[in-house]
Image (spheres, rainbow, N blue to C red):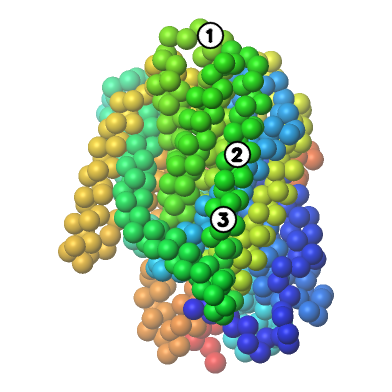
Amino acid sequence: MSDTKRAGTASGSPAELTLRGILLGGVITLLFTAANVYLGLKVGLTFATSIPAAVISMAILRGFKDSTIWENNIVQTVASAAGTLAAIIFVLPGLVMIGWWQGFPYWTTAAITGTGGILGVLFSVPLRRALVVDTDLPYPEGKAAAEVLKVGSESREGAAESAKGLSVLLWNGLASAGYAILTQTRLFAGEAATWFRVGGGATGGGFTLSFALLGVGHLVGISVGLAMFVGVIVSSGILLPILTAQNPLPGGPEAWAGQIFGDDVRFFGAGVIGVAAIWTLLRIAGPVIGGVRSAMAASRARHAGEALSVEERDLPIAIVGAGSLVMLLAIGWLLYSVIASGPLAGSEVSLIAGAVIFVGVIGLLIAAVTGYMAGLIGASNSPVSGIGILSVVAAALMLAGMFGRDTGPDTTAALVAYALIVTGVVFGVATISNDNLQDLKTGQLVGATPWKQQVALVIGVVFGSIIIPPVLDLLNTAFGFAGAPGAGPNALPAPQAALISALAKGVLGGDLNWAMIGWGAVAGVIFVMLDEVLGAAGRMRLPPLAVGIGVYLPMSLMLPVSTGALIGWFYDRWAEKRRDSEFALRMGVLTATGMIVGESLWGVVFAGIVAGSGSSGAMALAGDGFQTPALLLGVLLFAGLLAFLYRRTRRLVVSD
């Protein structure tokens, strides 16, 4: 059941899927997608657009008397889908890096992005019932976005408790954004990190001073947070010291451990994620099949004239099936246009048939796994690039099986490019499925109409596909990409694209780091068994997928999430003892949500500043010599603000 009811909220049919909402979502999309493309290529990270879009939408639509919470939800859905699709930059720049493309051909780039994205929307429709309705997954960002929408709606309607909730949201958002702004001046540190030697090896510790990451930790809960911390111990406490001792490299501990982390530890993490993803798929296979059957039953009931509640109306399963078939045919045509001339000409039938089956089967499996990951830890923290790694390895293995590894240089280059294009389509499925189910959870919590939201998701994909190619081409022309032929000194690193293209070349060339992937898979089996034993014993579980994420991502990102989970656990224990525990718990969610909102909105603004100035240090007021004072000031201010914000929330909860 949804927490927001339609009855009595408006006469007639309330505004939901409106032209006004779609156009507003499109405008927000233009800004957020461009910002995500730039930041993703610059630092390898993108930000979630759902919550910032919801905040902006509410601020604008408040001026219209007939606007509703459901129309605001459509705006954030459109913007979220398009902003998430920007993660395609983790694959496509690889085609420029290997010299296959000199730029980004508009229609080909848009087709790769759009077909995969729309297929991701369609694949996620039957998953909604299994992974959103009939599950207790936390969906931290979906829940946070729903709370933002509810607070905005209730404050407009004059609900008594909403004033406190809105106050928490605004104060925490301002504090989060304010600290993020101060870090850009370099007067206050944005990260506390150190690298050091351990025996004959090296390791390091880091903690990003990010309120957004702490907020995510609060929302994902203690079980996931502890599992991530276990992954950090495995990567930085065990693997790095051992591997750096076995493979000494020139330079200090930072360069030493940093290179080993990228070359070996991440592949170990990818192995853990792969096994955990397969196990997750096996565990949810029953609910997923049940969800498909439920969707088909709902379609039959609709055709029989039975009335379904608004919250149960998905896109008809027949439309989902027909749409998926159309997209697969479009993908086949796209791939034919890519290989019709060139070294692979003459092998079109086998290549296209293999790729379309691969996209259809692997894409559907990945849609389920990434949707589950979004429910577990949130869309912005899901290791979708790890799924991209597994996808490109699988695609390259398929091509190696068909052609062998003894092909000429031109044919090998064409096969690598083909593997990247196929992976780009699958990656579109993964990123959109990862985001869609988060959005559909928000819709469920506010009482939205699923089929209207699913249409909005398709529209968001179309918007994103239109915007992404020219932004990529502009950045390639202005900066280029590190490792690409002719790249200049200001080339953008595009780290994920570099790794994924290297993997494709490694598989087809026979020099992939299989050892670390294999050991990671063995560890993944152990973590799966440990989680099952804990579950059978009635103890707190350690989701193996979360452990793999903790191994794969840097400690500096994982420790704040684990810390936030611990803080959230303490807060929830306190809240459960209050007279109105439900209100107290909700205020905790809003505390975490405000932290995410503020930093996310500032991320959009700062991306514009960086793009306009051409420098990531445009706001710097201090030089490198101020690093130690900045670290001390940053830690003190960050800790002080964190304590103040939670104490303020507790005072509001207990006040009359």
Q: Residue at x 66, y 54 (%)?
A: 458
Would you identify the image quadrant in which residue 595 lies?
A: bottom right
Q: Residue at x 66, y 60 (%)?
A: 455
Q: Nearer the viewer, residue 381 or 86?
A: 86
Residue most extreme to the bottom: 656
Q: Earlier in the sequence, mark 2 or mark 3?
A: 3
Q: Position of residue 616 (x, y in %)?
A: 69, 38
Q: Is residue 303 above or below residue 278?
A: below
Q: Is residue 450 above or below residue 242?
A: below
Element on which disc 1 rests: helix
Q: Residue at x 68, y 86 (%)?
A: 9
Judge the density around disc 2: few (<14), some (14-19), many (≥20) Cα neighbours within 10 Å: some
The C terminus: image quadrant = bottom right
Q: Earlier in the sequence, mark 1 or mark 2?
A: 2
Element on which disc 3 rests: helix
Q: Nearer the viewer, residue 430 or 575?
A: 430
The residue type indicated by label 1 comes to: Pro
Q: Residue at x 46, y 83 (%)?
A: 582
The circle drawn on residue 320 is 3
Query: Which residue carries the number 2 mark?
Result: 329
Gap between marks 2 and 3 measured at Cα:
14 Å
The circle drawn on residue 195 is none
Gap between marks 1 and 3 measured at Cα:
41 Å
Q: Nearer the viewer, residue 582 or 595?
A: 582
The circle drawn on residue 409 is 1
Element on which disc 2 rests: helix
Gap between marks 1 and 2 measured at Cα:
30 Å
Q: Position of residue 189 (x, y in %)?
A: 57, 47
